[in-house]
Amino acid sequence: MKRFYDFFIQKAKDYYQTAPKIGQGDFFTSPELDEAFGISIGYFLEDYIKRLENPVLLELGAGNGLMARDILKILDIPYIILEDSEYLTNIQKQVLKDKNVRWVNNLEKLESFEGIILSNEFFDALGIAIIKDNKELYIDDTKEVWATVDKETLSIIKALNIDPSLYDEIPIDAFYIYKNLSRLLKKGYILTIDYGYKTHPHTNTLRGYKNSKIIDNTYKEDIFDITYMIDFSKLQEMGETFGFKNISLKKQRDFLLEIPYFVETLQTVCEEESMDSIQRCSRLKNLILSMGETFYALFQQKP
């Protein structure tokens, strides 16, 4: 029998270390849809970067490296990628060759800096514990067992004022990430983009995906993408716990539609009548319609 938290971590590690099908099978992310996503983020961050001395941009989990590629079309800034998947690191290095980028596989290897910390669909792959009725979820073979809440889980429940009697997904690794980011970021901003809720609905959001289909049993031994919806209220509270100021939380739709470059690109592309433009228009609309409704952008500041 093992704690679900440990089960989740191993599941995610197995998936991301063995040729994950990002953008070509299991799932796609916003940067895969269109370069306008990453370029828009570059323009959004531009003004904030100007307020900092010798800024650095740290991306947490860069996927195929496409967002970094597109951001660096706009920003001339030292770029660091946190990535522990050797497979993805090799892809990123091909996409970003000749760019001012370096890679680390552990935040402990970084020294403190001023700058921007950025992530897109990063937190949904971090380890969580699951609780309900003052019990924690463990896995015995492929069966659920509810037992005594682990001390580690309990400490984070107390830190975030979570009610352990309700079903909840406890962001253990995210808590440690924020603790590390507080140490690293002397001054600057965090931009987090992911799918989720403003407040957790106290229902199971855990999902497994393979070949774009939902897995019927997330506890089986097969290798697949395991994920869950992010509770942004917890990210906000973790930020405040570790000295960050919450500036804004917006749906991805509203976030992108406030960036002039994205709006101008959308209008220009969707007015054109070529087949390529029609297809691109559809992808851009996806960023503000279906994905625009389920994804959020959280912006926080380290004063």
Image: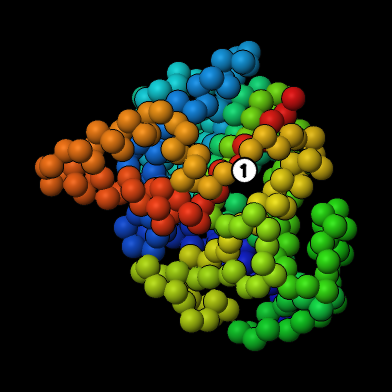
Element type where label 1 sits in the image: strand
* Image point (48%, 81%), residue name: 216
- The percent position of residue 219, horizontal first and vertical second, equals 58, 79
* Image point (40%, 23%), residue name: 74
| Residue 126 quadrant | bottom right
Q: Is residue 41 left or right of residue 263?
A: right
Q: Is residue 23 above or below residue 281?
A: below
Mark 1 — residue? Answer: 249
* Image point (33%, 48%), residue name: 285
- The percent position of residue 9, horizontal first and vertical second, equals 62, 62
* Residue sticking out furthest to the left: 274
How many labels sit on residues?
Answer: 1
Q: Is residue 127 left or right of residue 62?
A: right
Amino acid marked by disc 1: Leu
Task: Tell which of 90 and 155 is nearer to you.
Answer: 155
Q: Quadrant of the C terminus?
A: top right
- The percent position of residue 110, horizontal first and vertical second, equals 66, 31
The figure's colour scheme reads: rainbow
- The percent position of residue 218, horizontal first and vertical second, equals 54, 76
Neighbour tally class for label 1: few under 14, some 14-19, many 20 plus, Cα within 10 Å: many
Q: Is residue 107 above or below residue 285?
A: above
- On the question of residue 19 being in view, the answer is no
- On the question of residue 272 being in view, the answer is yes
Q: Quadrant of the N terminus?
A: bottom right
